[in-house]
Image (tube, rainbow, N blue to C red):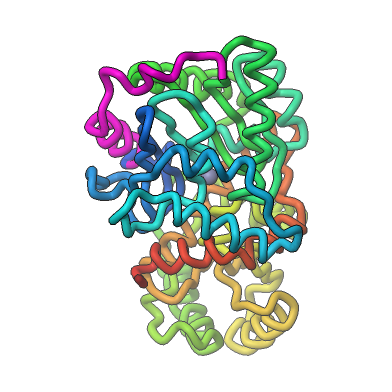
Amino acid sequence: MGRARSDLGEGMSIVDLVHLSRSYGSDPEWVLAGGGNTSYKDDALLYIKASGFPLATITEAGFARMDRQSLQRIWDASYPRETQEREAAALADLMAARVAGEEKRPSVETLMHELFPYALVVHTHPALVNGLTCSHDGEAACRRLFGDDALWVPAIEPGYVLAQAMHTAAASYAERHGHAPRIAILQNHGLVVAADTGDEIDRLQRHVVDTVRRELAREPDMSVRLMDAELGSWVNRTRQAITAAIDATTDTEDVVFGTCPEVAARLESRSTFAPLAGAFTPDHIVYSGSMPLWIDDESDLDATLPAAIARYRDEYRVDPRIIAVRRRGVFAVAGSKSGSQTAYELFLDQVKIAAYAEAFGGARHLDPHLVAFIESWEVERYRKKMSTGGQ
Ligand SMILES: [Zn+2]
């Protein structure tokens, strides 16, 4: 795509990739939970973050080595039309593109990295950028703010289908501009930045974030406040009721509670909460669930909560991970204390995105058909399993 490939990665090495990955991976502005992935490529091999290795602490051993020729054959492969068969076939080819002896599981977004003909690719899901990608005017704002510097990618099934769509869009971008895109902004998903040096990656990332930040009307107040005694005892009682109603939770300590001024403002009523009643990106579905349970009346929860949870279970076929109680706060419950903390962290990420999206015409959730796809996506289930410590 518009460049000689013989010098790809020259002067850079996987050491640069490790450095870059740790620096972005340890900054919550850029990376939460298992989200985000990075890669380095030379002419023959792509080194891609493997599933189960957090970027913040990753070493060279956390990257899966992929044969680029095998990856490129996937662009022209024909797969079954039926969704599950197609995903299984594409996944099998992805696994087969590992170099001999490589046993780690490459990121589900590996193909997306392959299509950028630059040595380094950093893909993240930052809340600030997702304020733009998860908004009604996101596409127009992307065009207005970044013009031809960024490729806008409409929301589509993640994984193979997304990579194919980006491959086609990037090829026509390269035809128009004489070089492949260095910035891609993915609707209801996140950001991809690609370059031949770490310094250039840093510059592009800063450019995107600074440009979006200048558009914001306000910064949400996420500061944590101390609970008073009355709230504290109400929280403890409600934790017990939640633990009793949700089988997967056996210890009240596994249920996390939180609030902050921005969350409190959302909890005023069902309508102020509406921007949070749905998932913004695949990360939110994976860690916080597709839909929070809204509790309108905080009184007598010991008696009413079991029925509310049972109704939720009937409707969504899973237990709620986020329980939002009007004018009180938010409970996260996801099997273990660390799982609940991650669920709450991703809920707060949604809260920030909803606030940032106000600058771009208001929040826009993932379409229901994409939510359904992601919920049933085998690869995402695997990622969730890895992130909660399963192997
Ligand atoms: Zn992603």
Residue 311, percent from left and from top: 72, 82
Q: Which residues are magenta?
A: 1-25
Give the position of the C terminus as an image quadrant.
bottom left
Query: In which quadrant of the rendered view does residue 313 lie?
Result: bottom right
Q: Is residue 5 magenta?
A: yes
175 up-or-down from 187: above or below: above
Q: Residue at x 52, y 81 (%)?
A: 242
Q: Nearer the viewer, residue 174 or 390?
A: 174
Determine if residue 302 is in view: yes
Q: Is residue 134 magenta?
A: no
Q: Nearer the viewer, residue 20 or 234?
A: 20
17 up-or-down from 242: above or below: above
385 up-or-down from 224: above or below: below
Q: Residue at x 44, y 21 (%)?
A: 206
Give the position of the N terminus as an image quadrant.
top right
Query: In which quadrant of the rendered view does residue 41 lie?
Result: top left
Q: Residue at x 28, y 49 (%)?
A: 62
Position of 206 compared to 132: left or right?
Answer: left
Residue 364, percent from left and from top: 73, 44
Q: Nearer the viewer, residue 165 or 99?
A: 99
